[in-house]
């Protein structure tokens, strides 16, 4: 029951359906994050799903960071990367 509440709240806040989240999760399972095209496709999927366009410059930056395995693991660095204050 608690799991359903989580997804219900997530759906309300993001307008992303639970099934879409599961489909996205399944599509990245076993994905090669060293492959630029795979990473680009994933970024574009997430962008479309969230209805938030990602400018080409930001997409290039994300791809480079992910492919080179330089993804920061702390929240402050991630927030800075995504332009949050």
Image: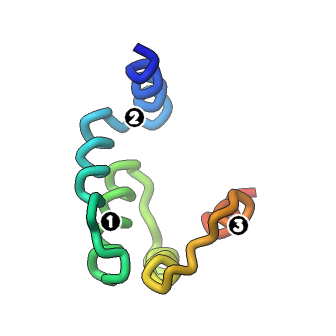
The residue indicated by pointer 1 is 42
Return the x and y of residue 19 as percentages of the image width and height.
Answer: 25, 36
Task: Tell me the quarter of the image containing the N terminus.
Answer: top left
Check the image and report above or below for 39 versus 44: below
Residue 62 position within the rendered picture, expressed as x and y whole percent measured from the top left: 49, 75
- Outermost residue on the front side: it is 30
Residue drawn at (39%, 34%) of the image: 15
Measured as percent of width and height from the top left, residue 46 is found at 37, 56
- Name which quarter of the figure residue 32 lies in: bottom left
- Colour style of the rendered protein structure: rainbow
- In the rendered view, does 40 fall on the left or right side of 57? left
> Would you call the spot at circle 1 few (<14 residues within 10 Å), some (14-19), or many (20 or more)?
some
x and y, in percent, of residue 6 in the image: 46, 25
Q: Residue at x 69, y 61 (%)?
A: 74
Q: Which mark is residue 77?
A: 3
Q: Residue at x 39, y 50 (%)?
A: 51
Secondary structure under the numbered disc 3 in the rendered image = helix
Q: Nearer the viewer, mark 3 or mark 2?
A: 3
Q: In the picture, which quadrant includes the C terminus? A: bottom right
Q: SS class of the residue under badge 1?
A: helix
The answer to whether the residue labelled 3 contacts the one labelled 2, judged by CB atoms less than 8 Å apart, is: no
Residue picked out by circle 2: 15
**Distance in Å between CA atoms under marks 1 and 3:** 21 Å
Name of the residue lying farthest toward the top: 1
Q: Earlier in the sequence, mark 1 or mark 3?
A: 1
């Amino acid at each position: 029951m608690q799991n359903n509440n989580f997804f219900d709240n997530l759906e309300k806040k993001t307008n992303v359906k639970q099934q879409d989240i599961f489909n996205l999760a399944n599509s990245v399972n076993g994905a090669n994050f060293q492959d630029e095209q795979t990473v680009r496709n994933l970024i574009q999927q997430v962008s479309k799903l969230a209805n938030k366009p990602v400018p080409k410059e930001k997409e290039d930056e994300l791809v480079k960071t992910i492919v080179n395995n330089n993804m920061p693991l702390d929240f402050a660095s991630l927030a800075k990367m995504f332009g949050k204050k």
